[in-house]
Image: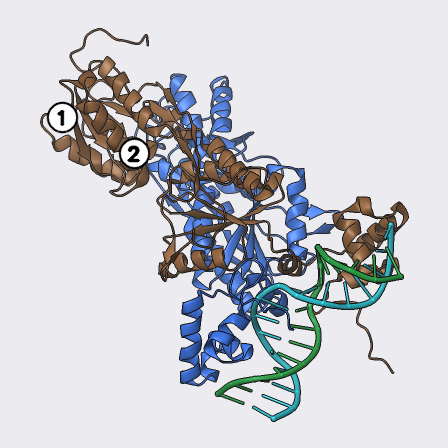
Chain colours: A blue, B brown, C green, D cyan
Amino acid sequence: MTPPQPTRGRDGAPRIVDVARHAGVSTATVSRALATPGQVRPELRERVAAAVRALGYTPNAAARQLRGGRSRMILVVTLKRWSAPFFSEVLRGIDHELSLDGYSMILGNLDLDRDRERHVVDMMFSGHIDGAIALSGIVARSEGRTMLDAGLPVVSICSATAGTMAVLTDEGESIVAAARHLAGEGHRDFAYLSGPAGNYNDAVRAEALAAFFAGPEASGLRLRRIEGDFTTQSGAQAGAHFLTLDPRPTAVLCCSDEMAIGFMKVVQAGGLEVPRDVSVFGFDGIEFADYCEPTLTTVRQPRFDLGRTGARRLLDRLAGTAPSGDAHLILRNELSIRNSTGPAPGVGRARRTA
Amino acid sequence: MTPPQPTRGRDGAPRIVDVARHAGVSTATVSRALATPGQVRPELRERVAAAVRALGYTPNAAARQLRGGRSRMILVVTLKRWSAPFFSEVLRGIDHELSLDGYSMILGNLDLDRDRERHVVDMMFSGHIDGAIALSGIVARSEGRTMLDAGLPVVSICSATAGTMAVLTDEGESIVAAARHLAGEGHRDFAYLSGPAGNYNDAVRAEALAAFFAGPEASGLRLRRIEGDFTTQSGAQAGAHFLTLDPRPTAVLCCSDEMAIGFMKVVQAGGLEVPRDVSVFGFDGIEFADYCEPTLTTVRQPRFDLGRTGARRLLDRLAGTAPSGDAHLILRNELSIRNSTGPAPGVGRARRTA
DNA sequence: TTGTATGCGTTATCAA
DNA sequence: TTGATAACGCATACAA
């Protein structure tokens, strides 16, 4: 007596053999009817489709992945300090583009705890994902190997990492353009409200600023650095520090809109008026820049497009339609002049009509 | 002549057999040394560990999943209208808790495009995930089946869905408490700046408000509804509409902080003063509520904890340490009284010391 | 065009 | 305690 033949797998889900039996064809035909319908006679194709509907069949992802070597999963590596409003728009852009090709996104936040970094590296080596996008500006590493060593395609967004494709903005030029704008308004004493030491974006911007301030165009201009870390709170702390300065800069270039907003709130509470006493320039172009008081002059970054473009590069690479290589792609920011900047104190003539 | 035996798998990654050969043991011993070290003699255990290090072995996730039936992947279903600041904190909470148990999070944004909903449902049936968290308040459905039909454990956060465990806040009571607070400040004419029609959270709050305003405690009080959709922009539109009302309500209960902030910006630009002319009550307790002008009185929701708690319930269920069932868990919100609310116009006596 | 049969890499069962 | 081996469910090379 033969053992009873179950028509269902372990967990009760129908398998490809069940569909095959139901349709009266072989498993190979079912597989082909689903993957390459053109290779199957219309009549059988229809019978297979009917069986799939009747049984509610969905192919098992693990088996498919084990056999095919691809998971259609992309790992997105982040750091929590990525300011939420900026970060979430980039993520939306990534998700949007990935879904066009049927890919999904696994989120890996690096600084949740110590194990997390190992977890991320392991995932790169476990075959669970087809590629990765790094938003962090850093490369996860664990036990002597990095997430790049797995040999999967990796795209960096907003940071250039050796060995990855990168999608960047012209952030250095942007912050210099901001400084130039303020210089044009008569400002001579500048503060740079920085990102955390070691941060890629801070480094690029600080270096560009330093070059500008050392150049002939900026003779007589002065720049000092105030430490921050992109958060609203650090902007508020910087504001408190700013109030103690004497003489005080009249123009402040911030590394994020959140910092600018925190900064403004505190210096306003301290009796200063923006932009009469101090002009504040943000960075990112988050939505709240339009709703704080005064509305924030800022560098608008193409957040959604950064995500979309980065994901697209990765997908093209995975599809083999793009050359491998780590050429950079640079998206343009644009200055958005609102009401938090204006002429330097003592410069009588307003440069902008209200 | 025997065919040459490759010591590497297809993609160049070492397999468990390679480790076994290197350590001079069987694959079963390698597997046990990694999964249940206690069952392996220390000497062999050490030889296996050395081989793993030497080869850089990471177990293949697909094979493991195919054999074991579990992926340690959780699907998180969202809608884009989930306001970013609220949403991202809940997500952080989820990610934090999942990572404690070695789980990862796949993000599925439902309203990216039409295929996305099918994609989400398919994932539930494909065995690719062990469970799901629904932040959306809706259940993905496609081709006659819903994401719940897969039989995987599902937790809803901020919405009660039949067939799922739910983690909620006392949002109905909270908004009534907000109304009661404003009534105590002398307000009699109220507006409710709503969420989109059909939204779970809007329904709960609107119903609670309606009950309160129909009750004896609120006799003489009046409530009207202004449509919104949680976004800053819809708050701004509501503000424009509000300016045309005559008589105008003096107290506005908003369904999100974003709406409250957009609303304030527009009515202030229209010449009203907050809270002198109109008191504005937000909802959520996002960070920017502390930085707008004036600072926003709001209902503070435990965003991070909502995510953490929801994920924990799911994990306990997956670990078998929690009973199945769909009991609700309700977290408490708290009122955060700041500067966007105050006495009703004409009520001379200030209720709060400045 | 369709069917048969093998292998993907792992874990669990069973026997030693 | 350890080793040999049989699934897990699918896709493809090959044969028909």
| Few, some or many residues within 10 Å of mark 1 (<14, 14–19, 20+) | some
Q: For numbered disc 1, what is the local secondary structure?
A: loop
Q: Which residue is mark 1?
A: B248
Q: Is residue B253 visible?
A: yes
| Residue type (three-letter) at the residue carrying disc 1 | Arg
Q: Name which quarter of the figure residue C15 lies in.
A: bottom right
Left or right: residue B209 versus residue B94 is: left
Vertical position of residue B157 compared to residue A119: above or below: above
Q: Quadrant of the N terminus of chain B?
A: bottom right
Give whichever of discs 2 and 1 has the lower sequence position. Answer: 2
Q: Name which quarter of the figure residue D15 lies in.
A: bottom right
Residue B302 at x, y = what percent?
Answer: 44, 29
Query: What whole-number distance in Å separates the C-alpha atoms at marks 2 and 1?
Result: 25 Å
Q: Quadrant of the C terminus of chain B?
A: top left
Left or right: residue B202 versus residue A225 is: left
Front residue (pair A280, B252): B252
| Few, some or many residues within 10 Å of mark 2 (<14, 14–19, 20+) | some
| Residue type (three-letter) at the residue carrying disc 2 | Val
Residue A40 at x, y = what percent?
Answer: 46, 83
Left or right: residue A37 versus residue A165 is: left
User: Chain for mark 1?
Assistant: B
Residue sitting at x 29%, y 41%: B199
Instruction: Give residue B204's mark.
Output: 2
Residue B56 at x, y = what percent?
Answer: 77, 55
Q: Name which quarter of the figure residue A201 lies in.
A: top right
Residue sitting at x 55%, y 41%: B317
Q: Comparing marks 2 and 1, which lies closer to the viewer?
A: 2
Front residue (pair C14, B340): C14
Vertical position of residue A17 compared to residue B286: above or below: below
Q: List the single residue furthest toward the front.
A: A1
